[in-house]
Structures are given as C-alpha cells and as structure tokens.
Amino acid sequence: MVTTPRTRRAMAGLTLVELVVAMALLALLTTLAAPAMSRLMTSQRLKTAASNLHLALVKTRSEALKRNTNVTLSRTDGNWSNGWTIEAGATQIDTAPAAKGVTVSAGATTSIVYAPNGRVSTGAGSVFVLSATGVNPRCVSIDSSGRPYAKEGSTC
C-alpha cells in the first residue's frame, strides 16, 4: 500500500479544535481541584507543625534525662509561632524555624523546663493550640508526668 503525502499529513497530530477542547477540559478540572488541594496543603502544614512541636517536647524531655540537668524549650523572638529553641544551660541543642501559615498559641507559657527526672518543673500543664485558616486546629499538651500528647481539636 502506497501512502501519499496528503494521507500521511492527515494522520499526524491534533486539529486546532481538538486542542482547544482538551485545554478547556484541563482548565475546568484544575479550577475544580484547586480549593481541595489548598485545604489539603494547609491541613498538612498544620499536622507537620504539631508533630514538630510534639517531637521538640519529647526531645527536650529526653535530653533532660540523658544529661541529668534541666533542659528548656523556649519560644523564639517572644512568640511560639516564630519557632522554638531547646537549650541545656548555655548549650543550644536544637532550633525549629517558624511554621508557615500556622499560628501557635500557648497562653502565658513562655518556656517549658524539664527537670533531670523527666518531669516538667516550669510550664506544667501547658497546652499549645495550633491553628490555620479553614482546617480543624491541633492541640499539643503536657501531662503531669511530663509526657507530651498531640491530638486533633482545640481542647486537650
């Protein structure tokens, strides 16, 4: 079978109409998916920030037990939303940067001090509420024995 140049050209590629229809469908699907994707990203930011705060509390407690000295978790630049620092005396152990798009509030708590026995000596009963626009808040709290807990919701 012999093909002519005209037949070969008719088989290759898309027509302009097909391309415009495909682009219109892509635009429609993107418009429908954008709000759900935005909410998912905000929710993931909030979960990550709560997890990071929980892990910082666990690490602070662990370092106090390991070093057999007081270890402090304190807010950065006077606000928990700006991040936090773990210190043992003058030694800086770890820092966490600010979480983007997440607000962290802890009432009047400025720092948490874990004693060498793993219990909280300053900041006992602290409750951190992490929130972001459009998603359920998260709560990180410290029980009387010094163990931190994280859960969904603004009440611990």
Image (tube, rainbow, N blue to C red):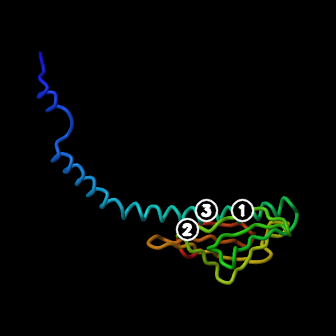
Position in image of residue 105 (x %, y %): 61, 78
Tag 3 and tag 1, C-beta contact below 8 Å? no
Give the residue drawn at x 68%, y 84%: 108
Give the residue drawn at x 62%, y 68%: 98
Residue that numbered label 3 is attached to = 51
Mark 2 vs mark 3, CA separation in Å: 14 Å
Give the residue drawn at x 64%, y 76%: 127
Position in image of residue 76 (x %, y %): 70, 73
Q: Nearer the viewer, residue 24 or 80?
A: 24
Amino acid, disc 2: Lys
Question: Which picture quadrant has residue 97?
Answer: bottom right
The N terminus: image quadrant: top left
Position in image of residue 20 (x %, y %): 20, 50
Q: Nearer the viewer, residue 44 or 61?
A: 44
| Mark 1 residue element | helix
Mark 2 vs mark 1, CA separation in Å: 22 Å
Residue that numbered label 2 is attached to = 100
Q: In the rendered image of this protein, does residue 74 appear above or below residue 2? A: below
